[in-house]
Image: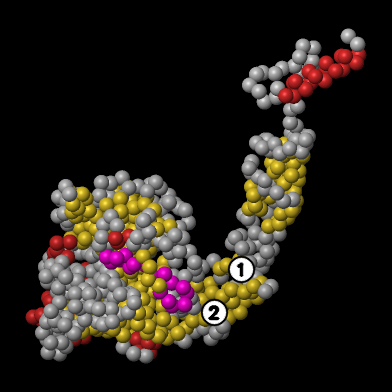
Amino acid sequence: MKPELAAVVGVALLSLSILGCGSDAPVGPTEGDAPTPVVTPVATAVTLSTTVLSFSSLGATEQLTATVQDQNEATMDGAPVSWASSAPSVASVSSSGLVTAVADGEATISATSGSAMATGSVTVDQVPESIQFDREWVAFDELDVTDMVLATVIDALKNPIEGAEVVAWTTSKAEVATVDASGRVTSVGAGTAQITASFEALSASIGVTVNIWDPLQPSVIGSFTSSRDDIAGYITTRAVADLNGDFNDDFVITGWTGCRPEGACGVRNPPVPVKLFIRGDDGRFVDKTLDLVGQEVEAWVNVPVIADLNGDGTPDIFLGGFTDLPAAEAPSKLLLSSGGGYSVVEAPHLFFWAHSAEAADLDGDGCMDIAISEATSPILMGDCTGNLFRSGYTHGTGRPLHYEKIPIEGADHVLSTPGLGAHTCFGDFNRDGSLDVVTVDSSTEIQDGDGWSLYAQDGVVLNVDWSSSARVREVYALPTPVRDRERPLGQLGSHDMRCAVADLDGDGYDDIFVSSAIGDVYWQGLEVADWDSQFQVYLNKGDWTFEDISDSAFPGRGPWEVPGFSILLEDFNADGVLDLFLSGGNISLTGGEGGEPNPIWLGNGDGTFRRGGLPDLVAMAYTGRDRVVEFADIPDNVVDGVIIGEIAPLRRATGEIDFLVPVTSRAGYSSAVPSGVPTIFLVFIPAGVHS
């Protein structure tokens, strides 16, 4: 074939080949052509998301990413990358590229893929952020005694900064306490002072309290008299906190008109006094209501709440309504701290029938919020200025929770309206950094034929998304209360009253403690000899299930041998394990079995408790009664008409615990009150009297 013809044929064949592209027929090389070589991508370049990292705190992290490219500059997704640090003691790097600051210094982080590598420089240089003390305050009960305070300069993640030493110590009141250049504090005189430590531009202060008190004796420190005589009980509810900054407990107390014999609570009840008792320089408690508020205070309150609501660093007091009276007649009230005292703010828009209330920063904005335990389950969202905005839980439909029947995970019954029971408490049960909600005595229902009927009054746990209108993600049931295990549905023996949340077994998960009273006795006038209650301990298993260890939590205790329903978890013997104070009263002084003689049970660290053998509650009750008899000149024939209320522990700055014993008398006697009108006497019993 002539060369010219061969060229024409080749062009024709090439054109046919191009035109055939995209057809279904396979097209391969013609006989004699060489196959196209397959080029394997090879990593030739690595690029880091950043090449310069700086850390000012140990433990700080930054995620690096590496992009790998081949010889054609194409990104190689999924290409293996190995990470290394030239100085792991300064900055470490994980297999995924997470860099962590370990110590001051410099390091180089390298990312390698095949023969390609990229590096980034890391500098760790701790920056002083604040000064941290080794305790919350310093306390003395003698003069000329010293105590060494340790102050540590720390970075933003609270790591000590080596070589950064406090260079100056000063005192605000040398007549109370002095401090030397090493931080040694010496008690000089009674009162309070501030000790300040300084480093460069940083400074921090710690409070010092010097309690120089003469020996204290049991005494009556105040009394309440009801304005009504047609109520079944007249008891006290109180909140304990340091109100004046001296690290000694003070308390807010109110008389509660209780429940009527026919069983209704909070119905047409009158307002009751609210008193602020402050511990004086002599160690004695004094009613300072007029001095701090400028007026007598009355409210329709069940349980007062103490929290910093206006963001000024001092406690405020919330008095939520517990009444069926119209809001305009019986508003909730706020006592907001102002200029060393309190201003009264009436809040008729915050109207409730509140069995109880608890404060916490629920939505994580740094401001205290309040959850109310009542039928419509309101939440009061705070703005750190003293304003509370009424809100509420919602469900997936966006409707308020109390309008819904909410499925309970793993159960055949539902959470129903009316809402969320007698008490609310908070814990992070799945350790996601957000608070979950426990409510006790919540109404639940079960479908019965074509309708719904009462299932129980149970404890439930709510997993709440606070960033989305307090939306309840799921509801989980707590185990059946002890008293309801053998009872038919709808015939309930328990009336869950209070809950508390803490890690009781040391596994890092919040556990739940619940106290219950006998419902069918509680509503019959608080008959003291019949008053009875049971505690329940639920251990969190970490998967939204809770193990009921109530039967074994109190070895050696009778099945219902408990003095009341209030609870306080605190480390009373300083062994690092939470203990339990059965902060109840209602001790029988009329020949009944009475209550637990030793109210403090010491924790074993596994959710169980042992008898503490500490203050004798029964002896304390008799001392309280005797002091009232002397104070009010009660005739012998009516002495047995007194009732011991909830005994409250009051901690001193130095750690000792005194007690407040409310003693209620309904008897009539000429030297005090008319016949049948309840009066509460507040008896102070100092530490050591009944140890």
Residue that numbered label 2 is attached to: 194
Q: Earlier in the sequence, mark 1 or mark 2?
A: 1
Neighbours of disc 1 within 10 Å: few (<14), some (14-19), many (20+): some
- The amino acid marked with disc number 2 is Gln
Q: Residue at x 75, y 20 (%)?
A: 16
* Span shown in magenta: 372-388
Q: Position of residue 269 (x, y in %)?
A: 20, 78
Q: Position of residue 273 (x, y in %)?
A: 27, 83
Alpha carbons under labels 1 and 2: distance apart = 17 Å
Residue that numbered label 1 is attached to: 130
Q: Residue at x 43, y 64 (%)?
A: 362
Q: Which quarter of the figure is the C terminus placed in?
A: bottom left
Q: Quadrant of residue 464?
A: bottom left
Q: Is-magenta flag for residue 504? A: no
Q: Residue at x 64, y 73 (%)?
A: 202
Q: Which quarter of the figure is the N terminus placed in?
A: top right
Neighbours of disc 2 within 10 Å: few (<14), some (14-19), many (20+): many
